[in-house]
Image (cartoon, rainbow, N blue to C red):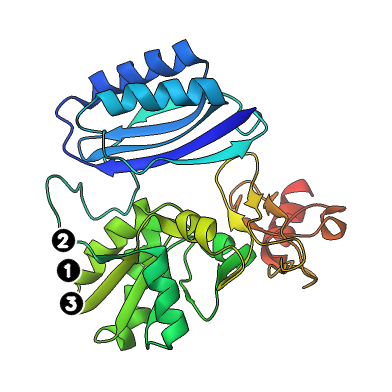
Amino acid sequence: MYSILLYYKYIPITDPERLKADQIDLCAKLDLKGRIIVSREGINGTVEGTKGSIQKYLEEMRRDVRFADIDFKESESNGKSFPRLSVKNRPEIVSLGTGTETGEFKKGTYLSPEELQAWYDEGKEFTVIDMRNDYEHEIGHFENSVRLPIKNFRDVPSATDKLIDLKDKVVVNVCTGGVRCEKASSHLIKKGFKNVYQLHGGIVRYLEKFPDKKFKGSLYVFDGRVATKYASPDKHVVVGRCATCGITSERCVNCDYPECHGHFVCCESCSQNGVFCSETCRDKMISRVV
């Protein structure tokens, strides 16, 4: 049996290169694959291995006082979600482009999955803002949530103007595991948003508690699984739609035009004669071939 571990923590790291080397050694010893980003602002990782190896990794991480209180999220896998191990040192553990966050920084008020569901049940007035990429939102999202027109998280600052009407409203930022919400919430607060909350533990924690409630579709994950289902089989609804023909689909692909390579939803049928996110990319590809 295999497991995937998803985690992050914003905490000052004085020697990122040393942490990177330590992570490479630890993961190699335990035969783990996945992606880990280390930075002066913290660590962000997704690793896969046997359940036994994942438990040993957890034990080692919790021995480090810097990471002992991390909210590690574990889920089952098939052992084939990652082709290799990648450990990199970058300026940010998730790229927003607004600068490295070190030490304590303002962020949204944590809202637990139970509290969010209670808000829904009570009919409280609030708006969920999806801080994920558009293709992630496409295959699964909270009902009536705001979808930002972004292909990458670093596009959030340029999309903030589209949220101006929510500046004095209660907003709840959501993302997969929480790491993007920390920075997105900080950014909104800096821009003058008054009532900023963020789903603690991310969509993953909400779906573990409430798989058949307000989140519809599948959860996009950045590994070989791509789309993960949490809802009961009789309640799961495919909400994604093929960008070409419009039928329901959860199949995500990359545009064949090399200068685009955009990620989008495309059904099997529409992929038979090449995969293009738009007629523009198709025409450009044809002109290159000719």
CB contact under 8 Å: marks 1 and 3: yes
Pointer 1 and pointer 2: residues touching (CB < 8 Å)?
yes
Q: Nearer the viewer, residue 156 or 250?
A: 250
The answer to which of marks 3 and 2 sits earlier in the sequence is 2
Do the numbered discs 3 and 2 sit on residues whose CB atoms are within 8 Å? no
Mark 3, secondary structure of its residue: loop
Q: What label sits on residue 192 in the rendered view?
A: 3
Pair 1/2: label in front: 2
The residue indicated by pointer 1 is 190
Q: Is residue 92 visible?
A: no
Q: Secondary structure at mark 1?
A: helix
Q: Position of residue 16 (x, y in %)?
A: 23, 27
Amino acid on which disc 1 is placed:
Lys
Q: Which mark is residue 106?
A: 2
Q: Is residue 145 visible?
A: yes
Q: Amino acid at mark 3?
A: Gly
Q: Residue at x 24, y 66 (%)?
A: 108
Q: Residue at x 65, y 27 (%)?
A: 1
Give the quadrant of residue 263.
bottom right
Rounded to the nearest angstrom, the CA distance separating label 1 from label 3 is: 5 Å
Q: Report the residue at 64% width, 51% height from top.
A: 228
Q: Residues within 10 Å of mark 1 (few under 14, many from 20)?
A: few
Task: Name the side, left or right, on which 273 lies relative to 134.
Answer: right
Image location (x, y in percent) of residue 261? 61, 49
Is 232 positioned to the left or the right of 10 in the image?
right
Amino acid at pointer 2 = Lys
**What's the distance in space between the residues labelled 1 and 2, CA to CA?**
8 Å
Up-down relation of residue 85 to residue 105 (above or below): above
